[in-house]
Image (cartoon, rainbow, N blue to C red):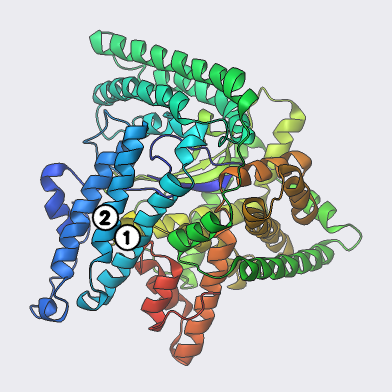
Amino acid sequence: MSVHGFALRVARSSSLPVRRRKLVPPVLAAALCTAIAAGCAGRTAPPAAPETAEVHYPADARFRAEVRDFIESELRLAPGWATAQGDHRYDSRVADLSRGGIAERILHATNWKRAFEAFIPSQLSPEDRADRQWLVAQTDSELLWNEEVRQFERDPAMYLPTSAIYSLIQRNFAPAEVRMRSVTARETAALANLAAARDNLTASRTPPVAIEIVLADMPATLAFFKSDLPRAFASVPDGPDKAAFEKANARLTAAIEDYARWLRGHLMARARGSYAIGTPAYRRMLADDDMVNAPLTQLEAVGEKELAAVQIEFDRTAHEIDPSRTPAEVAAMVNREHPPADKVIPEVKAGLAALRAFVIAHRIVTLPPGPEPLVRETPPFMRATTFASMDTPGPFEKSAEAYFYVTLPDPSWPAARREQLLEFFSRPLISDISVHEVYPGHYVQFLYNRHNPDLVRSLYYSGANVEGWAFYCEQMMLDEGLHRDKPKYRLAMLQLALLRACRYLVGIKMHTEGMTVAQATAFFEKNAYMTPNNARVEALRGTEDPGYLRYELGKLMILKLRADLRKKEGAAFTLEKFHDEFLAEGGLPIPLIRRALLGTAGSPL
């Protein structure tokens, strides 16, 4: 399962310890070898390799066997992600977040990094050579977060099992009775991690703001366990299994409440850690996650130039709409032009059909086969952290059903608060969000990855690739004629572009230059025209998500790749071909995609 969205803040859980990307599994154990070789059941198997392949690339077969074993070992260590991606062998377990479990993960990453580094690149095909480089980076990323940053000593959110439990009720992959028994077992297992949190979290390393964020989310977390989870199994008849679930759920809920009291009453008073991961870790994060090795001074200069350019275009577009108002006033006026709450979802659905038709008619990208995403209201426990999100099933889930979640205001809210949320769903913003999340953004990329026979590229992905692609699509679609001569739609795109440009700079400054939450809040207010409350939410997100520059970083690298490829191919270049080839490379970091499409890596920025 992959969830991408316009989040207020992305909440984390213990599904995957101290990991910044999602790990996704193959199919059942008995079929694992076959699944790796063919992709998986229901996926398109790659064509048979020519008989001469082993002569030219003698290490390919051994490398693929190692990859199969690596994925299997990852599944065992990350049961929550296994569930979310369609492998249900570990549905009764959670990741072991004790110090012993973290030590096992460090050993796992160390050994596999050494194993992949041992392959001689010239003995691998170009595709496997890129996969090897990506897996070395993946394993180094685990070592970064476990050994250098030691996230398990500073992140109280990772011990909460909310996502791991939600993945068991999210889709009907098995009868409710079966899934309920898995929830019972997983809730019981999760108690050990809440106990481990008290041993692992250290006052000298835990940032007070990290505790503040967890406690702010706690009402929604508890509401999920007290209301949403029991409601999911309301149809299951009473009996021993139902009683066991109710008992386990009550015990876990009480343990979470006790954990919140411990955070508030004990750790908060003593916590003195910094949220900043520091310059060395930040550079290593960029190298591991996105294979970007440019000096931070260069990256910051690129970001400042982009922010200035977007601000100029935003002001020009606002002046075109209404020269008598300030740019911020024009944006506020446009945002007030939204449908009523009960019409938001119908308008989103209608807009998706129009976007899909535009993509096809204008040959933006070839659309792989797949069902239309279902537009649904955001589940209650997710409403506090997201405006809209795309929730796609794991590549090994039998059902390809995907959900486009839209957050509607609670009818019990005061009118002013309801209006504030609805302003995010002005008609221009609905279009921009739908481009990002569905056509041709996250959902189309999900369809490509689901049909990709290379498991490394469908299971592991660079954040700058995925978020960069969706963000790139927002501008690209308007440039290709979507909503032509309607400046309000471009203003909406630019408003969100200002947000991403600010995130890019704030992420660097907060984690390497000492920028405070107050300074970051003021930066968002001044440069992205955000309200004080929303600006602070963005600043808080930056404290726990040092890589949220990935949207802007990825978009800029895709634009550079497109320009370089257009220059190389000349008249033979077409946008559709470029997009098809980019998405066919899967989740690889963009510098590796550059090498595949251009024949040389060159400068990604």
Residue drawn at (57%, 43%), measured in percent from left and top? 544
Please report contact status of discs 2 and 1: CB closer than 8 Å, yes or no: yes
Q: Which residue is mark 2?
A: 112
Question: In the image, is 293 to the left or to the right of 26?
Answer: right
Is 239 located above or below residue 278 in the figure?
above
Q: Position of residue 407 (x, y in %)?
A: 58, 37
> Which quadrant, please, contains the C terminus?
bottom right
- Give the residue furthest to the front: 204
In the rendered structure, which amino acid carries the disc numbered 1? Leu
Which dot, 2 or 1, sits closer to the camera?
Answer: 2
Residue drawn at (44%, 51%), measured in percent from left and top? 144
Q: Please, what secondary structure does the residue beneath circle 2 have? A: helix
Tell which circle, 2 or 1, labels the residue nearer the N-terminal end.
2
Q: Which mark is residue 135?
A: 1
Q: Which mark is residue 586?
A: none
Q: Nearer the viewer, residue 480 or 12?
A: 12
Marks 2 and 1 sit apart, C-alpha to C-alpha, by: 9 Å
Is 156 located above or below residue 497 in the figure?
above
Q: Nearer the viewer, residue 498 or 187?
A: 187
10 Å crowding of disc 1: few (<14), some (14-19), many (20+)? many
- Give the residue furthest to the bottom: 571
- Give the residue furthest to the right: 324
Q: Position of residue 202 (x, y in %)?
A: 52, 31
